Amino acid sequence: MSAATTSEYALAEQESLRLHALGRFQITGTAPEERFDAIARLAARLFRTPIAYVSLIDQHWQWLKAQTGLGPVGLDQGPTPRSASFCTHTIRSNDVLVIPDTQRDPRFVDNPRVVGLPFVRFYAGAPLITADGFRLGALCVADMAPRGLFPAHDRQALADLAAMVVEQMTLRRSELARLSMMGFANATELALLALTREGRIRFANRAAASLFGYDLDEMLGAPFELIVPERMRAAHRAALGRIFEGHLAKVVGRTLEVMVRRKDGSECPVEVSLSLWDDAREPNLGAVIQDISARRRREAGLLQLAHQDDLTGLTNRRRFESLLNDLYRRGEAATVLLVDLDGFKAVNDSLGHAVGDALLQAIAVRIPAVLPRRAVMARLGGDEFVILLPGTGDPLAARTCASAILAALADPVVVEAHVLRVGASIGFALAPDHGRNGEELIGSADFALYRAKQEGGGGARMFTSEMRHAAVALRSTQDALLRALHGDELVLHYQPQICLATGRLVGAEALIRWQHPERGLLLPGAFLPAIKMSPLALPVGAWVLDAACRQIAAWGKQGLPPFRVGANLFSAQFKAGNLVREVADALARHRVAPDWLELEITERVVLQSDDRTLGTIRDLRALGVRIAFDDFGTGYASLSSLKRFPLTTLKIDRTFVSDLLTQANDAAITRAIIRMSNDLGLDTVAEGIETEGQEVVLRALGCKVGQGYHYGRAMPAAALTGLLAARQGDAWLSVPTLRAAE
């Protein structure tokens, strides 16, 4: 690269830096300001010229920040091309540029300001030089007549005035920054304070005045204790001293929460972050302050919501468990009583959720009124409540408390003109004897509650060692079931469902069996309760759905005629919230038509149903799967359930069928169920048919489908496949064939 090229690059880089320095002053193109006009007037008087001006030179233009000279002797206020300006030559060096006669200087002889208005013949300009050496423009004087001399002392005076211009530009920039910061400080919602070493308020913005309730004049210069609660002033004064002694690092980057005092004497919580800086005189401490009163109120509200049951206002499960675990950590005795209302489901189902909710709210007021002073009552969910008696593991105290609860519920509750009678079953357990931790103690009370309900309800039972043995056995069974689930020991057997009019197969109910490696094939009664009382209900329920759909698909691939397969659901599957997706995935995974699958729901699911459960069942029906109501008539489900739920099938419980020929009441109930089911357009399946006589009567009553030992026990899929295959060319399987298979 040549020396000339190198020089050009250096000049270009220097010009770029100069323009950057000019831009930092934010002055080109701005309106006139008195400070600069005054310097221009002073220069004109000092040098006795009709024209004086301050110019700034950017990349392409000359800008005039100030000028004297009116009428024909003045210069244009707007920008002029840099190439036509005198000052573009001035800024090429640090020296004052003097042109005694422009018409004799070849650089300016053709300049528009020379050959036209204002006909400049004399020019002198001193460059505006910043502290870091950049020449941004010039202070200039001009005359319409040539001058022979501009002596050295005049040159120095002009240079001094130019230096004054630069000082004013620098001061102006600082003022702009200060004004901008003041505007920001007063616009922000954060309170800003600056304190001196002596602890006096040097600066406060409007938000600070508003926060503390003072006028700004009252705050400025006042000691900072003005805004500190009296009890905390000594500590804050000591902290201020430590900060100014160099200990700010301990609090930098941290947000401190403190209380401050307002003018009216009230206090409020704030967040404070601190910073320290030095100005020309002394160090200053800055504080950014935010009022967090609203946040504290929200947090208190959220904490209350987090600890409180939405419906009753009682303590919720999470808070209750936390309190119980705290007692365990401190090694204190405790008693837990579980209270489950008897008959609540019937009220909720017959009178609606609004009445049921009002009943729960009334109970939540009545029971605490009879509890000991330190007792804590919580709602676990549904109609189940729990009471904690802290500091006591006395069974007599627990029984006294249980008796008081039962007595409180003996009187009827009036809700919206309904006179409601509900009792309760209570199970209680004592810590530490009945549980190593809070969860185990509640579990023990739950087993006692289960025993109380088994005995007919309306009483109280304490957890005993016998129940503990049952719990251990249950846990052992659940552990073995988990291994069975992952070890392919669970299987489905299928019990045929027969059309009573034609004697042909129309469906099959999938029933779970456990092929135990040591005990052989186990029926559901041996293990199903253990599944229902544990988290196993979800994976086992999902397995049943998948296995049933897989078998439906297998029968389809074998060319067998399609028939519906019923699969039972656990109530836990409705609570999990993903049942619809689980069913849809199983159908899609095995490419099964939805109407080949029938999901059976029990009366317990119906009794515990809420809007979410009802919505789930409706969504399942919308998928196209069939919905069967199992064991109808054995519990408390009302007839309104048949209207609310999108059912396709009603299954008559075996208890009615078994005594159909001997008990007139059973026959009347069965007849009513069949007629109602037919009128509603539902398929009716009678379970537990064991004799031909039962079949004849049911067929005469209008029942469409039968299921029971009379047609065949539940059998492996391969056995049912063999029976179907034996009747090739016939779409259905006749009753005699099934009987022969037995």
Image (spheres, rainbow, N blue to C red):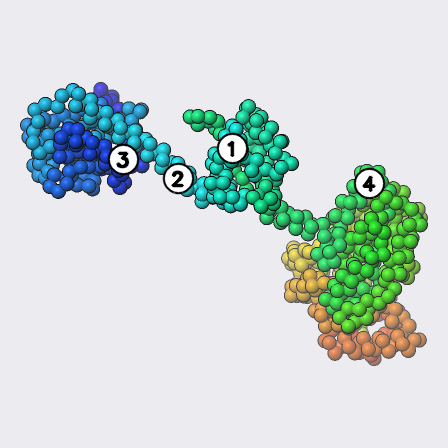
**Mark pair 2, 4: CA separation:** 60 Å
Of discs 2 and 4, which sits in the foreground?
2
Q: Residues within 10 Å of mark 4 (few under 14, many from 20)?
A: some
Residue named by callout 3: 35
For disc 4, the marked residue is 328
Can residue 509 be seen from the camera position used here?
A: no
Number of other residues with Cα within 10 Å of mark 3, as a class: few under 14, some 14 to 19, many 20 or more: some
- For marks 3 and 2, give the one nearer the viewer: 3
Separation (CA) of disc 2 from disc 1:
24 Å
Residue 584 position (above or below residue 735): above
**Picture coordinates of residue 211, whole percent (x, y):** 53, 44
Task: For the C terminus, give its image quadrant.
Answer: bottom right
How far is mark 4 from mark 3, CA to CA? 79 Å
Q: Residue at x 22, y 19 (%)?
A: 3
Indicate the amino acid at tag 3. Answer: Arg
Q: Earlier in the sequence, mark 3 or mark 1?
A: 3
Give the camera-side residue of 729 and 504: 504
Q: Residue 669, located in which quarter of the rendered image?
A: bottom right
User: Does 566 sit left or right of 187 as displayed?
Assistant: right
